Image: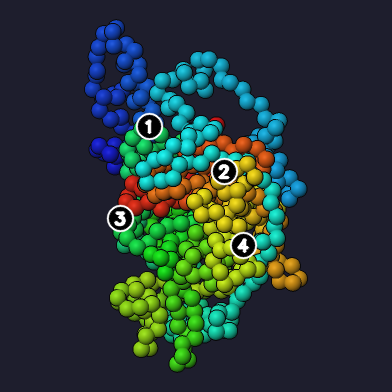
Amino acid sequence: MTVACPLLDGVATATVEVDSVGTAGLSPTPPYGGPGGASHGGGNKNKNKNKKRQRQYSHQKNAQKQHALRDLTQILAPLQKAGTDTRALPYNWQAADAKTAPWTGLHGVHSVDDRSRDKQVVRDPAPGTAADPAADPAVDPPADPPADPPATPVVGAQPVPTPVPMRTTGTGDYTLSWNDRNPQGNTYGDLIQQLRQDLQFTQPGYSYTKVSELLAASLPGGPFANRRCPAPMEDSGALVTPQGERVRNVTDWFCLAPDDTDGMWTPQGISGTWDSTAQGTAYDDTARAFVFTWHGPANNSSRVTFLNEVGVGPFNHYEHVLLVNPFRDASGPVSFDPMSIHAGGVVWYHQYLLIADDSKENPENNGILVFDLRDLFDLGLSAVSDITDTGRPIGLHNGTYYSQGNRYILPLRGIWRPQVTGVRCASMSSPPCFGYLGLDRSTSPPSVLTGEWCDARQPTPTCRPASPQAAAPTGRVARYRMAPDNSACDRGCLAYGSDGRARATAAYTQPTPWTQGGISWNGLYQFTMSNNKTATLGRRYDAVPGQPPVPHFAARGVQELYWHRAGGPAQPPILWSITEGEGVKNRVLYGVNPWIP
C-alpha cells in the first residue's frame, strides 16, 4: 500500500507493509536531491559544505518520516486495535511518571530519575559526542532568555519583569464557601432538572450528551484543528520571532479553523481528560480530548471547546459548547442567559469542569465556577429550540429557545466564592482573584492551583509586591486539595470541611506580575507570563519556593497550562499551553517538554 503525505513543497510517498498483527513498516521515498535522488557532485573544496547539506538532509528526512508515521498510524489504528491499545501507537510519544508525592514532600523537586534537585548531578557532555552541541553545527543553540531578562520596553507591551523567588504567604483569604443558588433563590440543580423537561427532548430516554458523542457528531463537517501547521513556526508566528528567538522543545501543536482565529471569542484556559481521570479518558466515557475556554467581548459570554486527541490524518475535530446561567422565567418555564465571565482558567476533574473567573464587569461571578458534564444538552434534539437563528438573543423567547447558532449548552451548577463577595477582586476589600487553574496529579490526593493576574501598573491589596524589596507586585497562587480519584464527590470535587468550606493548604507569591497560568509537578512549579498578544514572546518560569526562578521563552500571548500525561512511567508529562493572539499563526495550542535542559 502506498500512502501520500502532504508536505509544504510537494508530496512524499511511502510504501507500507502491514503484517498479520497490524504492525506497519514505513519506507519513505527520498525527496529530490537526497540519497537515491539527483546527484550533487562537487570537488574537495565543497567537502565540508556537502557534509553539512547531508546532515541537514538527514534531519529533514527523519522529521518527514516521523510526521508520515504519525499520520499513518492514525489511519491504521483500526488494524492495530485488535492486537493492542492506543498506547502502542508511535505517535503517542508522551509518557508519565505515575508516582504520587505526599503532601509533606511537595518541595522535594524530583528529576526524571527521581533524584531531588539538590542531589542531581549535571555532567557536561564529552567534547565531540552527540550530546555536545559543538559536535553538530546543525543543532540549534540555546535560545532561552538569560536568568535576568532585560527590562527594556518593546512596542505594544510592558517591559519584561525580572522574576523573584516565590515566598510563603497567608491562606486566610482563600477560604471558599459553596453557593448553589441564583440571585432569585432557586438552586441551580432544580433549575437544570426543570430545564431538562422544558427543552422537550425528542430522543427517548435522553438525559445528556457525553463528550465522545459530542465529538462524533462534529464529523464529517468539523470544525477541524490542523496538527503541526507551519504558520506558528514561521517568522513572527506565535512560537518564533524574526530575531531568532523561539520556544524550545516544542513537541506538538495545533492551529484552529480560520473562523476561530479572530472575531469576538478569545481563548484562555486549557485542560483535558488527563486531568479528568488517572487513565486519561473522560469520566464515565471513552473520549480522550483537550478542553479550552473562551470569553466574548467585555466578558459578556463564555464557552468551552472540546478537541479530540484522535485525529483524521493531520486534522483533529472539535466542538464548541455555550456556557449558560439558568433562571426561572416570569411565565414559569426555565430560561438561560449567556455566562458572563472571563473564563481565565479551567480544570476538568471527574465529571466536572472548574472554571476560574476574575471578571471586572460581573464581580458577582468571581470565584471558581462548577459545571457538571452530565448537564451537557444537545439543543438539536429539542423540539422547542432553534439553533439556526444566530440573530436572536440567547434564551427563551415566545416559547422557543435560542442559542445564537450553538448546538450545545452547559448550565452552571454552583460557585465556590471567597469570603468577600459582591466586589471585583481588584478592589480595596482584598478578596483573592481567580485568574487561572491548574491540576497537580503528582500529589495524593490530587490538588488544584489557582492564581492571580496582577497588573503591576495597578497595585492593590490582592496585587502585592512579592517582598518589601520588590519593585513590582506579583499576586498570589494558592493550592487546594481535591477529592480522591476513587471516591464519589460533589461541588466540583474540591475537598471541604464539616462547615462546608474549602480551605487552601498553601499560598505563595508568584514570580512575576501578569501571570497567566500556573501548575506544579513533584514540587516544581511552572508559571506563564504575558502582557501582550502579539508584540513579544511570553515567558515560562521554572520555580521552587525560595529559589530564583529559571526563565524560558513561551509563545506570544501565552495563557494557561495543562499537564498531559500518557500511559507509561518513562517520563514526566508534557506541558501544554494555549495562546490568545488573533490569526492562524498567533492562535495555537502547543506542548513542550520542560524536562529537556
Q: Earlier in the sequence, mark 1 or mark 4?
A: 1
Q: CA distance from mark 4 to mark 2?
A: 20 Å
Q: Which is more toward the observer, 401 or 206?
A: 401
Which image quarter is the N terminus in?
top left
Q: CA distance from mark 4 to mark 3?
A: 41 Å
Q: CA distance from mark 1 to mark 3?
A: 26 Å
Q: Earlier in the sequence, mark 1 or mark 2?
A: 1
Tell me: residue 589, above or below residue 145. Answer: below
Q: Earlier in the sequence, mark 4 or mark 2?
A: 4
Tell me: residue 97, above or below residue 113. Answer: below
Residue 376, how many percent across, how many down? 48, 72
Q: Residues within 10 Å of mark 3 (few under 14, many from 20)?
A: some
The residue under the point 59% across, 79% down is: 181
Q: Residues within 10 Å of mark 4 (few under 14, many from 20)?
A: some
Left or right of 559, for residue 478: right
The residue under the point 39% across, 49% down is: 533
Q: Amino acid at mark 4?
A: Ser
Which image quarter is the C terminus in?
top right
Residue 387, how many percent across, how many down? 34, 76
Q: Which residue is mark 2?
A: 471
Looking at the rendered image, the disc whose residue lies closer to the viewer, 1 or 3, is 1
Q: Earlier in the sequence, mark 1 or mark 3?
A: 1
Is label 1 in contact with label 2 (beta carbons under 8 Å)? no
Q: CA distance from mark 1 to mark 4?
A: 42 Å
Q: Which residue is mark 4?
A: 430
